[in-house]
Image: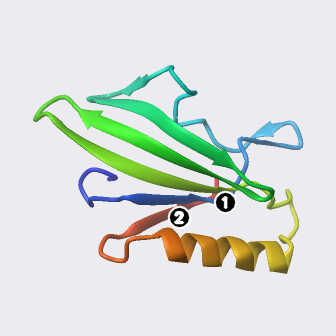
Amino acid sequence: MIWQENIQNVVMLTNLIENGKNKCIQYWPNKEQPMAIGPCKIDLLNEKVYAFWTIRKLSVQRKNPPSKRIITQFHYTAWPDHDTPNEVELVQFHRFVSKKMNGNTPTVVHCR
């Protein structure tokens, strides 16, 4: 779907583990440890950790036909399990993401 719809931005609104339960599988690699998923190779180009979110730049390379794209992941890390997030923090995250996004392509937003 990411490739087919030319997605450039992914917004993640969950943590990988909450209250000891797996909520999401880590679908991006750690730094300097490329990940292969199907016909694609994913590299973590950079990662910036802020107080309530993390921004990751991912390089996704497709083997056939050969091509490469850069995906930005906006990971909101302060959403509490079984609760609502702090309104000010969430609004700050929304404003940050809105300023950074390219409005010409769809955005994927997911929780778990």
Please give the label number shown on residue 109. Answer: 2
User: Splitting the image into 4 quarters, where does residue 30 fall?
Assistant: top right
* Residue in the image at 74% along x and 54% along y: 50
* Residue in the image at 36% along x and 70% along y: 106
Cα–Cα gap, marks 2 and 1: 8 Å
Q: Nearer the viewer, residue 37 or 90?
A: 90
In the rendered image, residue 31, in percent from the top left (x then y), is placed at 55, 27
Say what amino acid the circle numbered 1 marks: Leu
| Mark 2 residue element | strand
Q: Which residue is mark 1?
A: 13
Marks 2 and 1 close (CB-CB < 8 Å) = yes
Q: Residue furthest top?
A: 33
**Above or below, 53 relative to 103:** above
In the rendered image, residue 17, in percent from the top left (x then y), is placed at 77, 40
Dot 2 alpha-carbon crowd within 10 angstroms: few under 14, some 14 to 19, many 20 or more = few
In this image, 58 relative to 17: left or right?
A: left
* Residue in the image at 75% along x and 74% along y: 90
| Mark 1 residue element | loop
Q: Residue furthest left?
A: 65
Say what amino acid the circle numbered 2 marks: Val
In the rendered image, residue 13, in percent from the top left (x then y), is placed at 66, 60
In the rendered image, residue 102, in percent from the top left (x then y), is placed at 38, 71
